[in-house]
Amino acid sequence: MSIFCVPGIKGDPSPKFISRNCCGRLLNVDFLPTHTRTLQLRLIFIPRAALTYTIPVIKHIPVSNSQFVATMFKVAAKKTIKSATRSYSTKNGAAALKQRFSELLPAWQADVKDLKTKYGDTVIGNVTLKQAYGGMRGIKGLVYEGSVLDPYEGIRFRGRTIPQIEKELPHAEGGDEPLPEALFWLLLTGEVPSAAQTKAFSEDLAARAKLPKHVEELIDRCPATLHPMAQFSIGINALETESEFAKAYDNGVGKKEYWKYTFEDCINLLAKLPTLASRIYRNIFKDGKTIDADPGLDFGRNFAAELGFGDNKEFIELMRLYLCIHSDHEGGNVSAHTTHLVGSALSSPYLAFAAGMNGLAGPLHGRANQEVLKWLKEMKKEVGDDFSEEKIEKYLWKTLNSGRVIPGYGHAVLRKTDPRYMAQREFALQHMKDYDMFKLVSAVYKVAPKVLKEQGKTKNPWPNVDSHSGILLEYYGLTQESFYTVLFGVARAFGVLPALIIDRGLGMPIERPKSFSTQKYRELVEAKAKQQ
């Protein structure tokens, strides 16, 4: 580092220093007297970020002494520069995203207000009694900006298909898969971030990844017999101590400011999820030893490393893809809807997301990937290495005739092969086409739709995302099936947390649909039938 001293000027007698760090980045250094015992060293990365570092002053040496100031700079410089570098990434990571969202929000709020004013009384759908008793399936009643699911086209993230996000979102250097932190930016703002913005955001997330001591101790005390998803939920709830939103709300912050504190909570939570998840994984399945996130690595690579797969380039790529395609699937699924529902009561993002994870843990939702892999292994034991259509079809009918479903097939909305399934299949074709379990999944893909159509009990005989994800993870050695839903949970944060920020930004109200008893519904439909 080079340091150049500039004398103080009238009205500001403190000496000034102009410096260049090891990377050649220009620095301004101010030494500002605060009182007789301390000195503030202000280090400014021109033009973006600033850090103020307070150091003790030796009592008998005057603060104005240039020689003393220069000496203190040398003592504090190493630590200060390290901290300032972290501050730089913070300023240009999440802060840049926060600033961009702040710029977009007023027009967004105005658009929503105009839409409600002009068309607030417009009927957007009809509700049948069957829908009321069928889990409200298909009822148009939620606002969710990040993604929209079309029955025949599949998922679109801010209008972009999975192939489009794979192509358009920034990649890691030398990587082929999109970076999930870039997807977070897209889902929050509707804009594709630059490579530089994504890198800064990655650094910022890594800087926030450390867990509080009490959360580490809490997770370490959990018995290995407690399901990983239960531990994951416990850890997220315990992070409530870190909630900036909860503190601000208790201090009476105005409604228009809710989103800013929600934003900070969401970024901090997202950053800590891989650390929490990997600690659970290593405690239950490994030696309990953990590693810290590396500020120089992207989110997916850090997560892979924390799990113990940091040397496997293919697994790192898989993790980036996995996190992206499992992130969001519009707002009506259990984990997304629950996060929104609990968040609408102004619970902190930590409590809202934990509630969503409790929903994700169910076998009809996120745990389905675990069920698929178990079923595939059972099939493999019976059919051996014979993946002929005859053998596969026989086993499928055996499954159906026993009263079970074919796991991984069907979807509440989709009426075609899940594009997320296809993204995983393409990855497998590139990296593991000779893997026997991939061949089995491919064989089932050829036969299952025909069998399900013949059975006639499903509207969608095509595979969903859960049909494929398990065998990809197992191929690379992550064989602990009970942990798969935790991976899904980390991924789902990339979708539901931006949605929660948007909810607060748009001032969405508490969710409170109307319910009736069976008797009341009977009265309503019978009265309506008489009128016809």
Image (cartoon, rainbow, N blue to C red):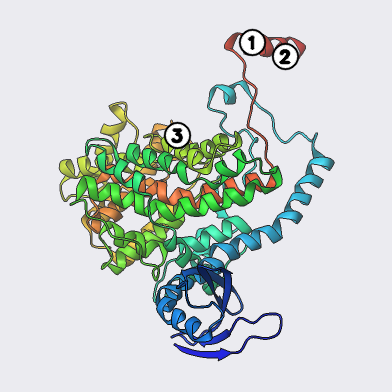
Q: Is residue 147 visible?
A: no
In primary-sequence order, the first of circles 3 and 1 is 3
Name the spot of residue 291 as percent of width and height, x first. Answer: 28, 60
In primary-sequence order, the first of circles 2 and 1 is 1
Residues at circles 2 and 3 in contact by the CB criterion of under 8 Å? no
Residue 233 appears left or right of 459: left
Residue 528 shows which numbered tag? 2
For label 1, the SS is helix
**Residue at image mark 1:** 520
Disc 2 versus disc 1: distance between alpha carbons?
Answer: 12 Å
**Residue at image mark 3:** 458
Which residue corresponds to the image point at 69% horizontal and 46% vertical from the top-left? 506
Q: Residues within 10 Å of mark 2 (few under 14, many from 20)?
A: few
Farthest right residue?
Answer: 118
Q: Is residue 86 above or below residue 383?
A: below
In primary-sequence order, the first of circles 2 and 3 is 3
Q: Nearer the viewer, mark 2 or mark 3?
A: 2
Disc 3 versus disc 1: distance between alpha carbons?
Answer: 31 Å
For label 3, the SS is loop
The amino acid on which the numbered mark 1 sits, given as a three-letter code, is Lys
Q: Is residue 192 above or below residue 112?
A: below
The amino acid on which the numbered mark 2 sits, given as a three-letter code, is Lys
